[in-house]
């Protein structure tokens, strides 16, 4: 049994790494970090031209029709480059929601524009503090009109459309939640940018006031659809986190080999060796779990819920661990704005909350394994 990517997929990885090395340098990331642009528009255009935005979108809807394994490969390279573009919100969340629940008309309208880079999408789920849960959805929908507030919404300030979770019932069951598709440029939605830990991935507050919306999927099936979307996104985000963890490890290793203290490379000191070894172990464990998640995602296996949670947990821990220890290896220099360490530290901690907290996914894994064992 082969647990690695195919030669074609490895070639795609090399192509993506070369492209991002040329187009997404730390200097380019800092343009967005410093607030001089909401995202890297030229990089976004280039990703579309390379076919990376539509790699998992079927050809009939303007994509490359490759699949989720290829998307995992791209996601890892996006994480390595710390790319300041709305890739995860548009490709992992909005596009996947459309693929799962969209009508042919909705798919034909939005998926080609995602693949071409003309449209940015997002998922409006959270309403302040708290993890994904039907009871945390307060925004209401009645007669195709939405009223309420969503925050934080990833890339909400630059999004053209949003998949919105809304309350359509009061039974206290998961079936009270439905999904809606909203054109954010069509009026009825007031968007305000929020200050957040990682400015290269913007967050927004969106207020819906008598905002017209069209249903996405069947009424009452919203939470079931969202669960599938979050599981898919968990695997894809895990690959981004693995890419970021590997890059943080490389940065720490390279600095440890170059920095001389007391007449020796600091990498020769036992404490630094142990730190780098621990980083390698956590990144390797995360990669193993992410590969399992990729298999489950690409085959739509019954194990996907557990595999997605495991990938999410291990990749979140690995990225945070490697990003933090990278700063430690760099010492006092690592804490400065001039060094790039903090950019990965910001991204690691921001991604740790993007789909729900680490403890949420730990609870999900336990509950899913318990149900599987009881069956």
Image: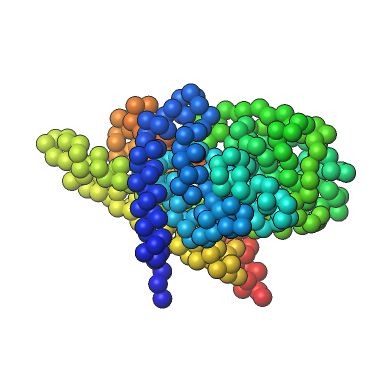
In what quadrant of the picture does the N terminus appear? bottom left
Left or right of residue 158: residue 173: right
**Apparent side of residue 363 relative to residue 286 in the rendered image (left or right):** right
Q: Quadrant of the C terminus?
A: bottom right
Q: What colour scheme governs how the chains and residues are painted in the rendered image of this protein?
A: rainbow
Residue 87: x, y in percent? 53, 44
Q: Position of residue 275 (x, y in %)?
A: 30, 47
**What residue do we see at 52% from left, 56% from top?**
64
Taking the image as shown, residue 30 lies to the left or right of residue 167, namely left
Q: Nearer the viewer, residue 246 or 80?
A: 80
x and y percent of residue 326 in the render?
34, 41
Q: Position of residue 148 (x, y in %)?
A: 78, 36
Q: Is residue 237 left or right of residue 207?
A: left
Q: In the image shown, does 286 or 18 lie closer to the viewer?
A: 18
The answer to whether residue 36 of the structure is visible from this angle is: yes
User: In this view of the protein, can residue 357 be seen by the observer?
Assistant: no
User: Is 1 or 58 nearer to us in this picture?
Assistant: 58
Instruction: State the residue at coordinates (47%, 34%).
Output: 42
Q: Is residue 330 positioned above or below 356 on the image?
A: above
- The residue sitting at 73% across, 55% down in the picture is 103
């Amino acid at each position: 049994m082969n647990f690695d990517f195919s030669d074609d997929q490895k070639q795609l990885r090399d192509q993506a790494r070369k492209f991002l090395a040329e187009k997404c340098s730390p200097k380019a990331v800092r343009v967005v970090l410093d607030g001089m642009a909401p995202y890297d528009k030229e990089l976004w255009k280039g990703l579309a031209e390379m076919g990376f935005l539509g790699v998992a979108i079927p050809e009939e809807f303007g994509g490359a029709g490759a699949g989720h394994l290829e998307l995992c490969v791209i996601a890892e390279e996006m994480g390595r480059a710390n790319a300041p573009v709305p890739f995860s919100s548009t490709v992992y969340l909005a596009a996947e929601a459309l693929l799962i629940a969209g009508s042919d008309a909705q798919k034909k309208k939005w998926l080609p524009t995602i693949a071409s880079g003309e449209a940015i999408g997002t998922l409006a789920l959270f309403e302040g503090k708290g993890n994904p849960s039907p009871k945390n959805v307060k925004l209401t929908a009645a007669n195709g009109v939405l009223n309420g507030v969503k925050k934080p919404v990833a890339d909400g300030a630059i999004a053209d459309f949003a998949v919105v979770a809304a309350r359509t019932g009061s039974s206290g069951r998961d079936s009270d939640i439905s999904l809606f598709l909203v054109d954010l440029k069509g009026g009825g939605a007031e968007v305000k940018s929020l200050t957040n830990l990682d400015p290269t991935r913007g967050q927004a507050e969106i207020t819906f006031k008598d905002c017209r919306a069209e249903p996405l999927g069947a009424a009452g099936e919203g939470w079931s659809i969202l669960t599938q979307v979050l599981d898919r996104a968990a695997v894809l985000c895990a690959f981004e986190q693995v890419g970021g963890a590997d890059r943080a490890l490389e940065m720490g290793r390279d600095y440890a080999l170059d920095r001389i203290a007391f007449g020796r490379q600091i990498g020769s000191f036992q404490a630094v060796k142990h730190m780098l070894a621990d980083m390698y172990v956590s990144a390797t464990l995360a990669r193993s779990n992410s590969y399992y998640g990729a298999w489950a995602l690409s085959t739509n296996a019954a194990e996907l819920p557990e595999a997605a949670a495991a990938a999410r947990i291990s990749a979140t821990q690995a990225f945070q661990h490697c990003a933090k220890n990278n700063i430690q290896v760099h010492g006092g220099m690592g804490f400065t704005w001039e060094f790039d360490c903090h950019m990965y530290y910001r991204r690691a901690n921001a991604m740790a909350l993007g789909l729900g907290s680490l403890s949420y996914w730990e609870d999900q894994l336990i509950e899913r394994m318990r149900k599987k064992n009881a069956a």
